[in-house]
Amino acid sequence: MTTTHIDGVSVTTQASVYFDGKCVSHTLTLADGSKKTVGVVLPAALTFGTGAPEVMECVGGGCEYKLAGSEQWLACGPGESFSIAGNSSFDIRVAQAFHYICHYG
């Protein structure tokens, strides 16, 4: 299932911009205090590090990803997601814009 709408949030209006503009996101704070980011990764091959565990939900476009310690590239498209352990990393390859929601914790 693809998330299309998130109710009851506050939005940080200043974007977080990474990798020379190849990834741009905004932080959402939910009523319970938990946080998510909503963003886009533009065509690139990048490596992201994690602090907390994350679930990357694809809401548009697609990507290929490889988790730390793995040699296997996997595809993720709209309505799909992948999980990354805390204090880890993942590689991502994007050919078309990858629109995502990052769920923390």
Image (cartoon, rainbow, N blue to C red):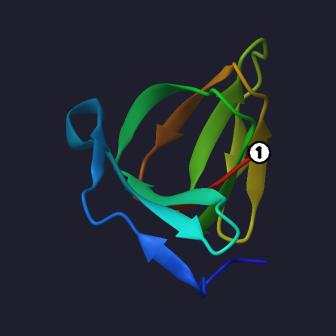
Viewer-closest of 32 and 96: 32
Question: In the image, residue 21 lies at what x, y percent?
Answer: 22, 42
User: In the rendered picture of this protein, how many numbered marks are placed on residues?
Assistant: 1
Q: Is residue 66 visible?
A: yes
For residue 17, above or below residue 3: above
Tell me which corner region of the image, top left, top right, bottom left or bottom right, holds residue 49. top right
In the image, 75: left or right of 60?
right
Amino acid carrying mark 1 in the image: Gly
Label 1: how many Cα within 10 Å (few below 14, some 14–19, many 20+): few
Residue at (75%, 36%) from the top-left corner? 53
Please provide percent x and percent y for residue 60.
Answer: 53, 70
Please tell me whether mark 1 sits on a helix, a strand or a loop: loop
Residue 59, by quadrant, is bottom right
Look at 35% across and 63% down and name the residue there.
12
Locate the C terminus by quadrant.
Answer: top right
Q: Farthest residue to the top: give it.
A: 69
Kindly indicate the quadrant of the structure image that contains residue 1.
bottom right
Query: What residue sits 42% from the left and 48% below the top?
Result: 95
In the current view of this chain or complex, which residue is farthest to the front? 32
Instruction: Residue 98: tell me if it is visible.
Output: no
Nearest to the observer: residue 52 or residue 73:
52
Residue under label 1: 105
Against 41, residue 73 (above or below) is above
Instruction: Please tell me which residue lies in front, 10 or 4.
Output: 10
Residue 26: give x, y in percent of width and height: 39, 59
Q: Is residue 24 above or below residue 99?
A: above
- Residue 17, x across and y down, in percent: 27, 43
